[in-house]
Image (cartoon, rainbow, N blue to C red):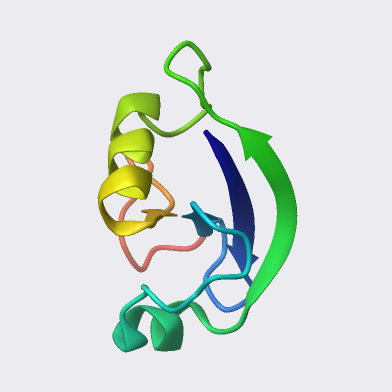
Amino acid sequence: MQCAIYKSLRKQNTYLYLADKDDFSRLPEALLKLIGPPTYVMDLDLHPERKLAQEDTAEVLRNLAERGWHLQMPRKEEGVIPGFRH
């Protein structure tokens, strides 16, 4: 499956996968407000055998097929205390 990937300029390390490039019509309005205007990064040929660095490929493919989009949010780092800065 061919998909387009966008990054959020508002939320660091947040990426949006779309089944149809530049088709934001299926995204909830609240999601668009959260991530801000998405910036195109690249197209990706996604298939079950392809490994993704931070996402489960099967879940991404399922979301793309069912709702037309998938949101990749940053994972919480283990051992990091919220609100604490070095």
Residue 4 visible in the snapshot: yes
Residue at image point 28% right, 38% down: 62
**Up-down: is 52 above or below 48?**
below
Residue 85 on image: x %, y %: 49, 63
Residue 55, by quadrant, is top left
Residue 40 on image: x %, y %: 72, 63
Residue 50 on image: x %, y %: 53, 17
Q: Nearer the viewer, residue 72 or 17?
A: 17
Residue 56, by quadrant, is top left
Residue at image point 54% right, 84% down: 36
**Up-down: is 13 above or below 60?**
below
Residue at image point 31% right, 80% down: 28
Count of residue discs: 0
Which part of the image, by quadrant, shows the C terminus?
bottom right
Q: Would residue 45 be found to the left or right of residue 71 on screen?
A: right
**Up-down: is 63 above or below 34?**
above
Q: Nearer the viewer, residue 51 or 85?
A: 51
Q: Would residue 12 be found to the left or right of residue 26 on screen?
A: right
Residue 79 on image: x %, y %: 32, 39
Residue 78 visible in the snapshot: no
Q: Nearer the viewer, residue 36 or 13?
A: 36
**Up-down: is 26 above or below 59?**
below
